[in-house]
Amino acid sequence: MTTVAVLVGSLRRESINRKFAESIDKLAGDRLTFNFVEIGDLPLYNDDLWQDPPASVTRLKREVEAADAVLFVTPEYNRSYSPAIKNAIDWGTRPWGKNSWEAKPAAIIGTSPGVTGGAAGQNALKGLVTVVDMVLMGQPEVYYAYNGEAFDENNNVVDESTKVFLERWIDRFTKWIARTSEPKTTAQPGPR
Ligand SMILES: Cc1cc2nc3c(=O)[nH]c(=O)nc-3n(C[C@H](O)[C@H](O)[C@H](O)COP(=O)(O)O)c2cc1C
């Protein structure tokens, strides 16, 4: 069983990015097991809080470290990615020397009602993901211009071309995780 810690950058209830991720989770079946990591209750990063770390922070680090891989599902906000994801990534890199993201196979996907499918937001996130030492899959890119009719009310993908597109991504990400995983020995320092 390959486990994926999934961070959805939108915190709103009716998020299309969350629905999109849930549909992919369903489509993947036994190939990938998605664990949706709560990031909406993380405080804004503050170094002082390490004196008595919030439960939300220790849970984030624990769930990321336990997973075989990480998936970021980001909305596009003003041609960039979600600040909730930036905040979660910052927490995960600390304390110094205990970077939870180190060597994790990772992917970035997302959707937007706009025709570019959130491409600018996803591309803005790529630099950060590699800086914190994750092993980011480059292809296939998933810039999905959201089409609600491609999914039913239970998050099943009902549109054939969307299914083919997402199946290919699931197949590649499953192989990427198998190919790039390395047993974690000691935690390495994150960037200063
Ligand atoms: C602050 C803000 C900025 C946005 N900027 C963009 C943008 O640059 N490009 C885009 O395609 N959509 C943009 N949108 C629209 C979002 O793509 C849309 O609200 C989408 O539904 C957000 O994802 P969610 O449904 O997962 O919350 C923006 C929305 C907000 C709230």
Image (spheres, rainbow, N blue to C red):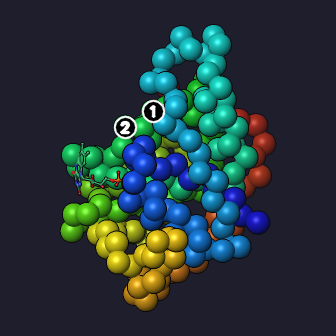
Task: Pick the quarter of the image with the N terminus.
Answer: bottom right
Of helix, strand and loop, which one carries label 1? helix
Residue 26, image x, y percentages? 59, 71
Q: Amino acid at mark 2?
A: Pro
Front residue (pair 186, 14): 14
Is residue 102 in sight in this rendering?
no
Q: Look at 44% across and 24% down and name the residue there.
A: 44
Q: Is residue 189 above or below residue 108?
A: above
Q: Which mark is residue 176?
A: none
Of helix, strand and loop, which one carries label 2? helix
Residue 169, image x, y percentages? 50, 74
Q: Look at 61% across and 21% down and name the residue there.
A: 54
Front residue (pair 40, 170): 40
Q: Amino acid at mark 1?
A: Asn
Front residue (pair 140, 16): 16
Q: Look at 63% across and 59% down and name the residue there.
A: 34
In this rendering, would 97 be left or right of 123?
right
In this rendering, would 104 be left or right of 163?
right
How far apart marks 1 and 2 lie (CA) works out to 6 Å
Q: Is residue 34 above or below residue 85?
A: below
Q: Which residue is mark 2?
A: 83
Q: Which residue is mark 1?
A: 87
Q: Residue furthest bottom?
A: 160
Is residue 47 in sight in this rendering?
yes
Count residues near mark 1 (Cα–Cα under 10 Å), then give few for <14, some for 14-19, many for 20+: some
Asked whether the residues under the numbered discs 1 and 2 touch, taking CB atoms below 8 Å apart as contact, a structural biologist would say yes
Count residues near mark 2 (Cα–Cα under 10 Å), then give few for <14, some for 14-19, many for 20+: some
